[in-house]
Image: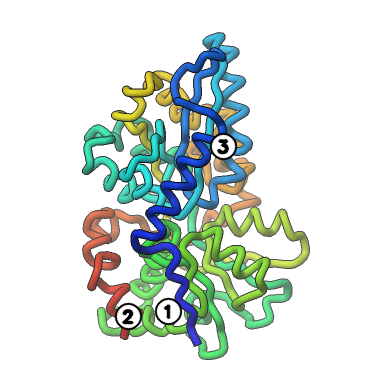
Amino acid sequence: MRKYVKTGTGKKKNRISLIACMFVLVFLMTGCGKNSDGVIRITNVSYDPTREFYEAYNPLFEKYYEDTYGKKVEVIQSHGGSGAQARSVVEGCNADVVTLALEHDITLIEQTGLIDKGWQKEFDKDSAPYTSTIVFLVRKGNPKKIRDWDDLIQKNVEVITPDPKSSGGACWNFLAALSYAKTNYDSLKEQKSFMKKLYENVTIMDSGARGSTTTFVENGQGDVLIAWENEALTTMDSYPGKYEIVNPSVSILAQPSVAIVDDNAKSNGTQEVSKEYLQYLYSDEAQQLIGESGYRPTNQDILNRFSDKFDLNIRLWSIEDYGGWNEAYKTYFDDGAMFDEIYSN
């Protein structure tokens, strides 16, 4: 029997995300901008699996900024499902920058006027300083002999993946699976049938990618976790000898996006430091750290240093193959679109 964990959808989750974000701000006594102690504080609202990366990146940036400009900076983090985090910013979370799982989540904030139009072109690579892809995490020995997407639709396989209604990573998971279906099945009917069989095997659907990892790793649920590549690598490092990564034949180039929340940054007086914070993600030092943290650097030379860590031969579809995020949402994730069709029937 499937267990649909609905914690990531609806007003309740939005309130929880907003309260959590505001609690972080109050707890750290930040008013944003330059405070009486002379420290400039900015808030980065991000998605679940970036926790470990930004825990390492923020001190690197803070040292760079003080060494370069002679001013102290403190970066405050907030994490959660990407869609829920976007909604928390819309509802009042005072983020200076957002670093979310997909472009569409930032577009939702842009539509409120908090982010200026054209944000995608403010930074290199369409404001995507790192990429990832979608892989499988299985238990040591791979007891169900999972090799590719078609193994996930077998009747005896229990799949863990989060909810596309609240998790950006879950949307990437869905499109990665659909990319396999489109590669191997010609008709839309066959593709829908494949996706329906896959989601019939999903036993627990958490609100975010980190929640799904917890379900699979700490709670011992499921036979396979559909995961961000970086999340799978982090789990391998944290639990040596207990898990294996399976790289499917087809996946998708996942491009998390970053942006300044212009309206907030202007009010907080943090426009300059917020821009520096995101721009520094493209520096050689940050790109090296990105690779070490399990994300794929956008700097090709640095990415090549990690060819033993990443499978660079996976056939990767892109969001452009689906007409961009606006079109993909209409077709697959909006109310009544394909996900609702295959999951509710």
Q: Residues within 10 Å of mark 3 (few under 14, many from 20)?
A: some
- Which residue position holds label 1? 199
Mark 1 Cα-neighbour bin, 10 Å: few <14, some 14–19, many ≥20? many
Q: Earlier in the sequence, mark 1 or mark 3?
A: 1
Q: Which residue, given by chain and number where applicable, does mark 3 sit on?
A: 302
- Asked whether 299 or 4 is in front, the reply is 4
Which x, y percent locates residue 94?
39, 35
What amino acid does circle 3 point to?
Answer: Ile
Residue pictured at 61% horizontal, 64% vertical: 214
Q: Look at the numbered discs 1 and 3 and tell me whether their residues touch, using CB distance below 8 Å.
A: no
- Give the number of the mark in front: 3 or 2: 2
Question: Looking at the image, is mark 1 or mark 3 nearer the viewer?
Answer: 1
Of residues 258 and 141, the one drawn nearer to the viewer in this rendering: 258
Per the image, the residue denoted by label 2 is 342
- Residue 18 x, y percent position in the rendering: 41, 47
Q: Position of residue 161 (x, y in %)?
A: 49, 69
Contact check, label 2 and label 1, Cβ < 8 Å:
yes
Label 2 environment density (alpha carbons within 10 Å; few <14, some 14–19, many ≥20): some
Please state which amino acid type lies under the numbered disc 1: Tyr
Q: Is residue 106 above or below residue 62?
A: below
Q: CA distance from mark 1 to mark 3?
A: 37 Å
Say what secondary structure mark 2 lies in. helix
